[in-house]
Structure formats: C-alpha cells, structure tokens
Amino acid sequence: MNFDFSDDQKFLKSEARKFLEGRCPTSKVRAVLDDPDRSYDADLWKEVAAQGWLGTAIPEAYGGLGLGHLELCVIAEELGRALAPIPFASTAYFLAEALLTAGSEAQKQAWLPKVAAGEVIGCFASVEKPGALTDAQVQARVEGGKLTGTKLPVTDGDVANVAVVLARENGQPGLFLVELGGAGVAREALTTLDPTRGAAKLTFAGAPAERLGEPGEGMALAESLLQRAAVLLAFEQIGGAGRALEMAKDYAVNRYAFGRPIGSYQAIKHKLADIYVKNELARSNAYYGAWALETGASELPVAAASARVSASEAYWFAAKENLQTHGGIGFTWQMDCHLFYRRAQQLGLVAGGTKAWKERLVTQLERRNAA
Amino acid sequence: MNFDFSDDQKFLKSEARKFLEGRCPTSKVRAVLDDPDRSYDADLWKEVAAQGWLGTAIPEAYGGLGLGHLELCVIAEELGRALAPIPFASTAYFLAEALLTAGSEAQKQAWLPKVAAGEVIGCFASVEKPGALTDAQVQARVEGGKLTGTKLPVTDGDVANVAVVLARENGQPGLFLVELGGAGVAREALTTLDPTRGAAKLTFAGAPAERLGEPGEGMALAESLLQRAAVLLAFEQIGGAGRALEMAKDYAVNRYAFGRPIGSYQAIKHKLADIYVKNELARSNAYYGAWALETGASELPVAAASARVSASEAYWFAAKENLQTHGGIGFTWQMDCHLFYRRAQQLGLVAGGTKAWKERLVTQLERRNAA
Amino acid sequence: MDFNDTPEEAAYRAQARAWLQANAPKGHVRDDEDPAGLKEAKAWQARKAAAGYACITWPKEWGGVGGANWQAQIFAQEEANFPTPGNPFQIGLGMCVPTIMTCGNEVDKQRFVGPALRGEEIWCQLFSEPSGGSDVAASRTRAVRAPDGSGDWIINGQKVWTSGAQFSDFGILICRTDPDVPKHKGLTMFWVDMHDPAIDVRPIHQMSGASGFNEVYFTDLRVKDSQRVGEVGDGWRVSIVTLMNERNAIGGGSSYHRQVMNLASSVATLAGSGIKDAALREKVADWYVQAEGLRLTRLRTQTALSRGQTPGPEASIGKVVTAPLMQDVANTAIELEDQFGIIADPSLAPLSAMFQATLMSAPGMRIAGGTDEILKNIIAERVLGLPQDVRVDKDVAFKDIPTGR
Amino acid sequence: MDFNDTPEEAAYRAQARAWLQANAPKGHVRDDEDPAGLKEAKAWQARKAAAGYACITWPKEWGGVGGANWQAQIFAQEEANFPTPGNPFQIGLGMCVPTIMTCGNEVDKQRFVGPALRGEEIWCQLFSEPSGGSDVAASRTRAVRAPDGSGDWIINGQKVWTSGAQFSDFGILICRTDPDVPKHKGLTMFWVDMHDPAIDVRPIHQMSGASGFNEVYFTDLRVKDSQRVGEVGDGWRVSIVTLMNERNAIGGGSSYHRQVMNLASSVATLAGSGIKDAALREKVADWYVQAEGLRLTRLRTQTALSRGQTPGPEASIGKVVTAPLMQDVANTAIELEDQFGIIADPSLAPLSAMFQATLMSAPGMRIAGGTDEILKNIIAERVLGLPQDVRVDKDVAFKDIPTGR
C-alpha cells in the first residue's frame, strides 16, 4: 500500500516550486490585477509552455511529455500556490482532457501538439445563465456544423483560440470544438471577482463547430470532463490554501500585540489549527482523486466530487481566515491576502460551485449504495 | 416605545426565582432522574399550583389569576431555569391554551378552574410516527364521538388526566378533548432522552372524545396552539440557556489550569462569548414573541417561529458547550451539565424540532412578502 | 411591552416630523463626502443646530437642548425617513468633542464645541498605529518638549485607520511622551490642526476599492502646550473617554441588520419566488432570526436608554454577529449563482455584483472598529466578567515591551 | 500511488491471514471486559505472542520479532476481519510497558515485559488528577520517604480517568516528591501493584450510563524504592515517553471515521432511500468528505510509517474532527425524527435510540484523551510551530502556583 507521490513526482514538484518562486512572485500576479487590459501574463505563459508542463499528461506521440496525471497534479498544486495568472486550467485540464477523452485521432493529431507547445489557449464554454450546469442550461444550437448561441461566463474565453462548447444538435447536447479566431464569433471580456483570471461572454452566430465524441453524448462527456478537471483544480486549491496558512502562520509569529506574538493567543492558534485540519483533509481527498484519475478507477465520480468539495471549502476558509488573522493590514490593497481571497472564489466557481458538487457527491453515493 | 417587561412582571419573576431556588434545587430534579418509577415531582407540582401559576393567563372568571401571557412568560423562564420536573407546559401551555382559544363556554367552565387549581394534568397528543407534524401524520379517527388510534410520543401522557388530541372526523383533522382515566385508553410510559420529563404511548380504542372548536379546523387550531406554546417554551429555553452560561462562567472563573483560571484563556472566553451572543438574540426574539402573543398581533406566526428557532439553537449550544467547558468532570453523572444537555433536547423536540420550525418561518416570511 | 408611543413621545415625534417636513432637504441629496456633499452636510447640520436638533441630549450651555435619550432616538428615527446628506460629524460629535468637553480646558471648550455642533468644523480621531492595531496604549507617535523652552511639543510619528482625516479641520491625537514608564502611563492627548503642513494625510486603498480610511504622518509637527487635552501622562484615561463612545458608535452596527435583511431577500429573489431548495430555506431562517434578533436587541437597548438605564449588551454584539453573517450571506448567494457568480459587471449580473461588493467589504467589517476576536474578548471580560488574559506588557517600561523587532 | 500490496507485503498478508484462519477464535466472541471476556482476551493474546504476532515491531529479546511497521499494520488489518476478543492490553503494551523498557531498571524489564506481552498481566496508567485535568505536571499525589530509613515511599492522593484500573494487575503512577521546586522538576514515576489493599478503585458513572473510567485512591500505599521508574525528580521526562504514545493511541480516533460513516448512512436510512431534503443532502456530503478525508489521511500516515518516516498529522486531527462531527450527526438525526426523536426505547425506535447513545457519549469523546481545545493547542504548537501561551506556572515552586483555592 502506497498512498503518496513518488520521489520523482516530489522532485518534479520541488522543481516547479523553485521555477515559479523565481518567475511568478505575487508582483507578477498584481501586474495583471492592476492592468485592466490584461487578463493573463503572456510571458509566464510562454515560460511555462517552455517547461513542457502543458503536455505533462499528453502522450509523446502527440508532442507531450508522456508523463501522467499524478505529475500534472503536483504541477497544478504549485500553480495554485503561485496564483499563476495564466490560462493553464482551461488549456491543460479542459481542452487537452476533452481531446484525450473524446477527440478523434485526427482531432488529437491536429490539436494536442499545439496544446503541448503552448501554441493554443483553450476554454470550456458550458453555462449560459445563473445556476448549476444542467441539460436545460444548454440552449446553444449546432445546425449543419454551425454554432449559434451565447455562453457566459467562459473562463479565459477572452484570450482562448479554441473552445470546447456544449451545444444541442438535433435537440441533444453534444460537445463541440470551435475556433474562436474565425467568423461568427464575438467575444466580450467580463470584469470578474478575480481580475487575475480572465473570462468572457462568447456569442456565436454560425461559427464552424466540429463535434467531439458521439452525438448526444454531450452531458456525459461534460460530466466526465468536469470530474477530471475537479481533481486537477483541487490541487490548485490545496496549493493556494497551503500558502494562505503559511502567510497566516508567519504573520502570527512575527506580529506582536500587547507584548506577545498574536500566535500565542488561543483565538489565533485555534483558528490556524482549524485551517490546518481542513487543509489536511482536503489534501487527502485530493490525493484519492489523483489516484482515481490516474488509474481510471470506477471511484472517480465519488473521489472527484469529494476532492472538489473538500478543496473548495478548505481554500475559502483558509483565504478568509488568513485575511482575518492579518487584522487591519489584511484588507488593504497592498497586502496579498485579497489575492488568495479572490482566487479561492474563482477556483471555487470555475468548474461549478460547491453546492452543485455536494449534490453530485450524494447522488453518486446513492448510486453506489444502490449497487 | 417600551420593549421590556414591566416592573411588576420583573417582580413576579424574581419572586418565582426565589421560590424555585428554595423548592426546586437540582437535587429534586435528580430525584426524578434517578427514580425509574417517577416522571415528575408531585410535591413540587402541588406547590406550584398553590402559587396559582397554572392560572396565570386564565381569566378570574375561570378561577385563574387573570394576569396575562407576559406574566406567564416570566414564570416559564424561571421554570426552565430551574429545570422544574413537572408537567407545567403540557397543562398551562397546551391544555389551557387549547381551551382558551378553541374551547366552548361549557368546556372552559368545566376544565379551566381545575387547570388553574392544578387538579388536572393535561397533554397534547399530535404525532404518531417519526417526522414533523403534518396532516398525513394524523391517522387517529373519531367516529360517533369515539376515538381510535395511537399517539406517540405524548409528553406527560403517562401522568395526564386529559389529552388534547388531533384526530380525523369525517376525514378532516379536528381537535378533541379526551379524558385518559376512562375506558378505551391504554398508556405505556416511554423511556426518553430526558427522564426528568415524562412521555407515553397512548392507544385509544373507542375512548369518548369531545370536539374542541369547529369540525375540520384541527390543523389550523394545532398550528395556532403550537405557535402559542412555542413562545412560552422559548422562555423556558432561554431560562435554561442562561443558567447553563452561568454554570460555565462560574466554572471558568474558579477552575485553574497551568496556574491560571481557564476563563483567562481565549478559547474559553470566546466560547462563552458565543453562548452569550446566541442567548441575547434568543431572548430578544422571545420577547417579541411574548409581545405578539399578549397582543394577539398578526406578527405571531413569524414571531413565534423566530422565538422557537432562536431559543432551541441557543439552549442546545449553551448546554453542550457548558459541558465542554467543564472538561472531564462535565460528562460525569454527578455534575449537573447533562441535566441541561438532556433538557435542551427535550424542549427542542417537544413542540416540534428546529428543522420543522425553520420551514414554518420561511413559509410565513414568503406569505408576508407576497402580501 | 408596547411598541406605541406614550402621549409625550407621540407629541415629540409629531413636532420633529413637522419640523423635518418643513426643513429637510428636498430633491436629490448627496450622501457622499466629496466637497459638494460636505457643503450640503454642513448646511443641514447648521439648520438642525439652529432648531435644537443637532445634539439633543447635550446641555443647553453647549448648544444642546438638554433633551432625553428617547427624544434623540425619536428624532433619529424620523430623520431616517427623509433623504438627508451624509454625516461626517459623527466621530467629532460622538467622540472627539465630548472628550474636549470632559477633559479639555475652558478656552478649548468655548472655542470648539459650538462650531463642531453647528457643522462648521469637522474632527477626526488619531489613535490607531501600524504597530498598534487594536492596542491603542501601544502608540509610538512621539511628542517631546521643544528644546527652546517654549513649552511647545514637537510631534513625529504615524497614525492609521483614520476616518475622515482628508476633510477634517481638527483631530485629537494620542502621543507617547514618556517611553520609560509603563505603556498606559506615558501617553498624552493633544488636539491638532489638520491643516498644518507638518501633517500628511494619505488615503488607504482597500481591497474593496474603497478608501475611507487614511494614514496620517506627522513630521516635526509643533503644537502649543495649551493644545494638550488633560494632564501630561494622563492620555490613556483621556482616550478611554473617547473609546467608550466609539464602541457604541461602531460596535452597534446600527444598520447592518437591515443590510443583512436586504441581502437575504435578494438571495430569495435570486432563488426565485418560493425557494425550492431546503438547504437555502434553512439558511434564510438562520439569517432571519439573527438579523431580527439583533434589531430587537437594539429595541431593548433603546428602551433601557429611554428609561435612563445603562445600555445593554447590544453595542458589543452588533458587529460580531452581522459582519461574519454578511460574509456568509454573500458567499452563499454567489455559490447559488454557480459559475455565473464570478461576474462583477452590474449590467450583466446586477445581483452577483452586489453580493461581490459585500463579499469584498465584509472582511473590513470583521476587522475595523475591533476585530471579531477583540470584540469577543470585550464581551467575555466586560459583560461576563471573565479574568483578563495574562498581560506581559503592563508593569514594564514601554521601551522594554517585546515587539518582535 | 498504489493501493495494492508489494509482493513482500502480499506474502506477509497471506501468511498472517493463513495463521488467523487457523488460530483466530471461532464462534461467539466476548469483546467486553467482564471476567469471562478478560479470560478470552488473555488466551488470544497468549496465542498471538507464541506465534510472534503480539508486538510485531518489538525487538526479539523482548519477545517481539523485530518486524517493520508495515507488517504490524497488515496484521492489524487482517485481524480486524476476524471476530476477536476485546483488547485490554492496549494501554499496557502501548504506553506503560514501553515506559518500563525505556526508563525502568533491568530487574523490572526482565520481570514485566514478558508477562505483559503474553497477556498474563494487565497494566493501567495513573496520571490524571481531579485538580489537574489536562495538566499532568500538576499532579498532587504525594510520595514521601518512609520515616524508617528503609528508602521505601509512602504514597497518598487520588488519580482519576484511569481506564481499566478495575482489572489491572499493575500501574505506572506519577507522584509529587518535591513541592518546593517548579512543577516539572518535582515529579517521580513508580510502578505499583494494583492488588495492594492500600489502593481503592472506584468506577466513574458517566452521563451516558457507561463507567469505563475509574477514580483511584491511595491511602498510605507503601512501595519499595526499587519500584521507582527513572530518577527521583525525573518523573516528567518519564511521563513524556508514555504520553507520546498516548496521543497516537487516543488521538487517532482509529475507528471513529467508520462510526461516522455508519451514523451518516443510518441518517440516510432514516430519511428513506433517495434523500429528498436538500439541507440533509448537503450535510451528508459534508460528513462524508470529512470522514473519508480522515480515512485517507490515515492511509497517508501508514504510508509514511511503512517508509520508516515519522507519522503525519493524523494522530492529532483524528479526534478533533470526529468527536464534534458525531455529536452533529446524532443531533441532526434526532432533529429529523422531530418529536419522535426523544424516545430512547430501542424496541419502539431503534434508530433514535442509537443516535441518542451517540449523543450521550459524544461529549465524552470531545474531552477524554485531550479536549478539543487542548488538541488544537497541540496542533498549533507542535505541528504549526506557533509560540506557547504565556506560562505563569513554570518558574515558581509547585506549592506557590495559583490554584484559586
């Protein structure tokens, strides 16, 4: 029994951390935050691509590193820890995974090498209005290979070259690949809670659309895609939550009040202990998701939902209580606390909110118990 | 604007406290707890009756003191504080209020004087199985003035002389008055979470039943009865919660660990502050309920539900965290902590649980907003 | 219990309402604190002062009418029904000027009370410091006698979290005058002219985008000894007078419960009429009993005040309940919108934009005017009477207190 | 990551399973600790010892087989699949005897280790006191030299929360031998014969009705100086050896997560197949991710152990997560039953009776083996490295430490 990452994977992780500590200090994140015209750091994107990280889980045959999802998980944790302001998730978790799981040989040949090389940015266009993703949400239509409809919000839709779109064909939801550079596509950048990650409203008026997978499989493919992304996002979340705890701890040790470090007061001690406990539980749930993802185990639906719920709640708690621990300075623009507070929300919503995932989890548990 | 009890009412309250501190120390409560054959303290019951408290809100014309419900509220708070092991709520809140709100002149004449004198013990027989009280719960039937069916649990049903029973007549739920001494009534005492308050399973086989109020009004009458009881029970609950906080405070001041009173540690300070805050909010909600009950204001449904939810949660929190504050000694039989822990559960369930009352509250709010 | 006015209360209410109908500003009213808004606020304050509605409970000699608490409450309730300008005078009239009236010298009282009451001059409170946080007695801003023997003081240092410093005319400033005695004994209070060029006011940019607070820097600020408020070394006692009022002003979270109610009903709107989701229904119930409980607790406090009793617990529990509550309500609402909740564009998603604004301001609410943790200490120690935490900073010279640096 | 055994692990598992199939008790097994149950437990322990499965990781010279942690884990997993008697040896073999092995003299080691390992003698741990609570170093039980110069010690005092004292043969006892030095310096450890008439064991009646803990009174108990474990005044260091193991034993809440899972699914049963209530669905999800997260954290710890690394955080987080969780699950379930939830009669309401049992035992879980508060301090200080709280009891003579009396 071995429920931990291998030494090679841990080495990859520490290398990734070193790299990001050098290339992605929070000053780089703030540069994107403070610049209304940018929603990601193009230089960092190139540097990350040059590391080959985008192709971590892509077979060598398609220009990837041919490593696995466990390796992608450790990189995800470091990207989350660094608050990396790049469209990595949209490209590596959504576009690449959609191609790997549903793409035809031709589609893989056409796109995966570009993904691995960082030549394209992807995005996942699923929802169209408030509320969880449901079949009824999907109103966009594909007729004769042309897509018509509106999707919002679409994370990274403002900078993506290609979108994985959920749309109806002959009344049935399907998954489609749509290039965003061409005709019939209008995009409107959105202001969001976390300006360090972009989002857009995409309006399609007869844009050419190529189906991924079989007709009518759309919802099933989307669910499986969301499960895979949920695991990878969980690692970004525990990465961020872990760093938020470190921030709180460092501040609590160095900040004095009434002649003592505030970390010597039980209110702060127990607050940080609570963060720690939630983080550890989230980490364990994320590891299990990683195992299920890597091995294609039948536990994936339950493991992914558990990882998602646990990580989303842990990050939100860590981010808001880290800020609280900082006191007055904590809610100033100059302190980094709000960067984590914003990202915790962004990551908690991007693949669907906790509420929806709790519902998925219980539904899966009921299925499992019934079986 | 005057949102407080009057000086007379406060005087009545302090008199009631003095009386109960003398007559109802926790040793009396334990005597009932430790005696499997007793579910209430008959001597205390007589003494309380002698005080006239049972008739507080009963008009003088029917042998009561002719005071009001505000006076009954302050007495309720003291009875809750003292953990009084007597069927006061079943008799004064349920039986008496049912008669006052739905009883015919003849029924009032027949019963209220006995209630006021403490010559009869009442009870409210509503539910028959697990889950909140709904129309569907009511399976007991009345045909030709005879009641058939089973009710459980019925608080104080083991010692009551007369029951207010919810049963169907011609398919419609109605409220009925049933004497428990006569034929066609079988009762089985139940062991419960709080042995200091009795409960029974009542089985009716053709017991004579007299209708209270109009035919088919049963659910409406029961709801109004529950609202009135909810306010009065809320006062018993804040009485108990207040005393649990005092216990925790006294222990925290006098118990030393590592050379300091445990009350000087923030973990204990903040725990007690949390109890205090919940208690104060519950008190305010209870006061509003008292006002609505006394004045027959249209706010009663919302005010009663708020008082109930707020008080049930405050008492449960105060009871369990008072126990936690006591540490090891707290979960021993010899300490009184578990008496409050048990009573908090009993009072939180007797007129229906928090979950059901939250549902009532939101439904009422929706009605109000619609109006 | 009776929510109706007594005849006396009703009479006063009618009189106040009539006066407000005749005198309250009509049409659009600026409630912000830009120059134009300040002008309107000052004009309105002046009109209230002239009619004896500015500081109702103050004694006549100071321009009040020696009224009762219940009168001030009723006027405030009635005023709330009219569109009135912002109130930049709260800190001055609620904390600073009362401090001058209690601890200041005759000359200062005569000089400052009237203009402040009439809204001619605005005051700010200069207590908190970067190193101090909730620990005002740890102030490091240094005041030393001028070497020229004039008796003047030279002040150097920095204050922070100062509301309204950018438009204030005067401020009360607590300084360290003797670092060789225990922290509470080496402080002295002064009033300062905020227009002095030796004072530099810089706005603090908050995560919410707002910047209502300021940093205030003092570089060789020279003040006369006559600007001292209270004795040398008596600054802590003087600051207590100010802070007592602050808790009531801030701790009360006066309108928070209304904000929570509005938020909660917006969530209901979001969920559509007749919320289906049982989980959300239970949350709405939780929010309601807390916000309503707080509103009613305020009514208990007002009753106590109007009976001339000391205020109840409400001042201390208001914020500790509502600030985390609002954070929870906003987070729940955004979660309910799922992916859509991320959108901050009011035109595309008006509700989620509103909830996000709350989400970004809630952290400040949980901290400004006393963190959740400090407020719970206050409840535990002052209300419940639990013993103080161990204090290692009390009986040593200020300069010897550990600071970690 | 791989949940499958390595060939080596698989081989050991097969061997262990085969042995268990051949040797584990068949049919009905008593897991309670009445005389009959104890007899079965001792027999089973003897059989395991004979086969080298009693204390797998102990060195050969002490009757172990010098095995690895992963072997002990695998045997425990396999043993859990068989109906085995209760384990009254845990405290002795987990805490007391290792303390003797580390700090005791040669004679004692030779005398006690073997019989304990073979289940012939049961040990208990006599540390906590009524005045002490979580503060073991505050022990007041007094040991003084006998006046006759024999070097013997006379012990008087009281211990509390002693598990298994009623059926133990020996116990390790921490005493105050010098009240004139700081608390941690004046303690000395002894082993005592629990059959000595000078020792009075009284069961503690808990609110749940159970009485697994005892009060133990010592009245002029005379012990030889040779019964001393470690040097005079060195008792605190010795007790640390014992307590380090205790945290792992108790803190882990080894089976709590399984209990939570069972409770949660019973709640589901209660709500009927396919829970309709969204509020309950969300709670079930919350409970699941916590209980499952804990189970998985244990697997991470086991992985670390089997790699010869120091155990992870799990030991400290187990109980602090599950104890309040079980209280919440039970309370939710009872609330779901509404009025019916009050019934404690298993025949009438089997589920609510079970939830009530949990509700009445949960408070003890939140306290025994370290309260929630103490465990969070441990996480904050030992895991996160936050500074200790201010200690007023460290540098003064024990007799001068404030006790409030």
Image: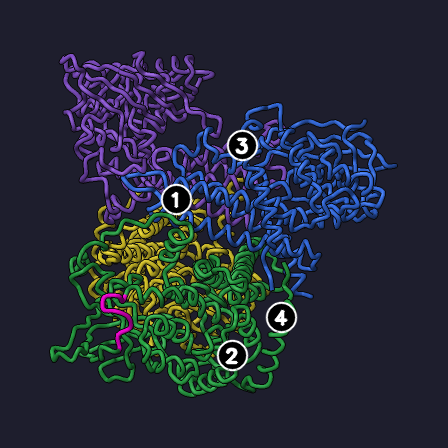
Chain colours: A yellow, B blue, C green, D purple
Residue type at numbered disc 4: Glu
Rendering quarter of residue B97: top right
Rate crowding at label 2 as few (under 14), some (14 to 19) or many (20 or more) other CA atoms within 10 Å. many
Rate crowding at label 4 as few (under 14), some (14 to 19) or many (20 or more) other CA atoms within 10 Å. few
Q: Are marks 3 and 1 on the same chain?
A: yes
- Tell me which label, 4 or 2, sits earlier in the chain: 4
Number of labels in the image equals: 4
Where does label 4 land, which residue?
A: C8
Is D150 situated left or right of A302 in this image? left
Asked if residue B364 is positioned above or below residue B133 in the image, the reply reads below
- Disc 3 and disc 1 in contact, CB within 8 angstroms: no
Residue D204 is labelled as: none
Where does label 1 land, which residue?
A: D293
Please provide percent x and percent y for residue A359: 51, 52
The residues bearing labels 3 and 4 have C-alpha atoms spaced at a distance of 61 Å
Judging depth in this view, the residue of D4 and B180 nearest the camera is B180
Residue C53 is labelled as: 2
Magenta stretch: includes residue D113? no
Which element is circle 4 on?
helix
Residue type at numbered disc 1: Gly
